[in-house]
Amino acid sequence: MEKKNDNKKEQTPVAMDDYEKGISLNALREEKVRRQQRGSPTRELDDLIIKIGSASNEKGNRSQ
């Protein structure tokens, strides 16, 4: 099967509750700090933090 190269990014939706979203954001922020300490660029992490942080929760709240 041929893969079409039309320069569009493939998006994969992921549903997360508030707890999962918090864990993900925390991990990304920790990685950002590590990269800053090494002097590495963090632009991609910044973009992802903003994207996840501003995404609405479609899964709803975690019920126990």
Image (cartoon, grey):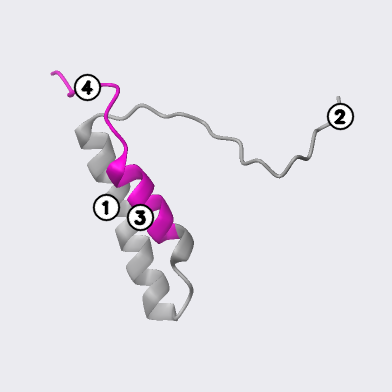
Residue 2's label in the rendered image is 2
Q: Which residue is mark 3?
A: 28
Vertical position of residue 28 compared to residue 23: above or below? below
Can you give x and y, in whole percent of width and height, for residue 54 in the image?
29, 43
Front label number (2 vs 3): 2
x and y percent of residue 15 in the render? 36, 26
| Quadrant for the C terminus in the image | top left
Q: Are marks 1 and 3 in contact (CB under 8 Å)?
A: yes
Badge nearest the viewer, 4 or 3: 4
Mark before the other along the chain sequence, 4 or 1: 1
Closer mark to the observer between disc 1 and disc 2? 2
The question of residue 52 being in magenta is answered with: yes
The residue depicted at 37 percent of the width and 79 percent of the height is: 37
Q: Nearer the viewer, residue 6 or 47?
A: 6
Residue at mark 2 to residue at mark 4: CA–CA distance: 38 Å
Magenta highlight range? 45-64
Tell me, for residue 26, which label it has, or none.
Answer: 1
The residue at 48%/59% (across/down) is 44
Circle number at residue 60: 4
